[in-house]
Image (tube, rainbow, N blue to C red):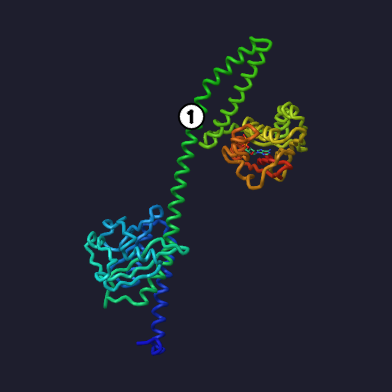
Amino acid sequence: MQREEWTLEEKVEVLERRVAVLERILRISQILTSTLQLEPLLQTIAQSATELTDTAASSIMLVDKNTGELHFETVSGSKREEVKRVTVPLDGSIAGWIVREGKPLLIPDVRQDPRFYAQVDETTDFETRSILGVPLQVRGKVIGVLEALNKMGDGIFTQDDIHTLSTLAAHAAIAIENARLVTEIQKAYEELSELDRLKSEFVAIASHELQTPLTVILGYASFLKKETTGAASEQVDAVLQSALRLRSLINDMINLRHIETGEAELELEQLSLNELSTTITAEFASLAEAKKQSVTIQLASQPPMVEADRQKLHLVLANLLSNAIKFTPEGGRIQVEVETKGNEVRVSVRDTGIGIPPREQERIFDRFYQVEPSLTRRFEGMGLGLSIAKGMIELHGGRIWVESLEGMGSSFTFALPLVE
Ligand code: ADP
């Protein structure tokens, strides 16, 4: 019967059937988009394809991203495991043709088609008679093929079947791609976590092993310094200073490890941030003087008391001040300010230094992160100071952040809860 001759009732019937199929595909699509694991997802797709096209079985083949080969991934039915990962040649197979052409293909009788690849039937004891195959496409790229096998009833696939299977394939392809992406991201994340673990382990072992010889060097250098005079004394002093610097680097690594493993413990006491900031700023006076920098301090009018670990806050403020001095050219200005704001106290260290580009401002608090690439950098350091500062402040239930304009200067601030 030609389309033109269809009665209104017949047209309505066809449309109703299509709407019913689309409703089912929509429901299936909801299930597909909520399944992020590839294996169950493929099963659902294969089952749905069989149901929707009223066929005996269906199968899914996917193109391997690396080799470009086409592999059987799943078939509905009991012989699932046997066909898994069977390779289907791209040349001389129906699925291969669909991948190459990116178009559906209907084969009413496979025995008459030279492209039929019989090997899978031999493996599964399933006798394929007819095939309807459609490409699984994402953004114009064929990622696989969905096939429905052996139409039930009169055994003849219709235009509606092609339409239905193609619609299902469009939803299925996106769901498959998403599931693969999730798997890839999970894998990459696991690899990164492993690398991170190895790095932490290395840092732990290295810092621990370096401690003992360093203690010996420091011991003898201090002893020799007392014993020697003149030029030799200067040389011993250089050894001592370098050893002290090495100790502070090792301490950074140990501190970081303690924060990471949750081993860092707070020895809390009530202390005034006015007093602590004054003490530490004074400690850095000679370092700033050597670079002809001015250091000023502005204190809160009422001594702001916090419940904190003195040594750890000392470390935080020392890191901020040494960075300010390091990243500010000669003659620059550094300002420390303590102020209370609501129920917290804020300590800021401002400088007129090189500043930090906006895109780097979050990352500088990451471990080992430095704005300048390590091999060409002008400033010494390991990129640990700020991550330690952040860890220590967060241990105290506080926050730390930076505001900065490139070429103009930076302002680092930490806030801690005030003790009433
Ligand atoms: P380090 O100082 O050892 O490199 P930090 O963790 O203390 O490590 O700092 C990380 C990076 O943040 C520094 O390498 C630098 O690029 C940037 N930075 C920190 N403080 C300042 C500052 N006051 N001015 C400009 N850049 C800074």
Q: Quadrant of residue 313?
A: top right
Task: Quadrant for the N terminus, please.
Answer: bottom left
Asked whether the viewer can see residue 276, the reply is yes
**Element type at mark 1:** helix
Q: Residue at x 72, y 41 (%)?
A: 409
- Residue type, mark 1 in image: Ile
Q: Position of residue 15 (x, y in %)?
A: 41, 81
Identify residue for label 1: 205
Residue 110 located left or right of residue 306? left
Q: Quadrant of residue 2?
A: bottom left
User: In the image, is residue 167 above or below residue 242?
Assistant: below
Q: Nearer the viewer, residue 54 or 20?
A: 54
Q: Nearer the viewer, residue 377 or 184?
A: 377
Q: Residue at x 67, y 41 (%)?
A: 415
Q: Nearer the viewer, residue 198 or 400?
A: 198
State how many labels appear.
1
Q: Position of residue 371 (x, y in %)?
A: 63, 40
Asked whether the viewer can see residue 395, the reply is no
Q: Residue at x 24, y 61 (%)?
A: 124
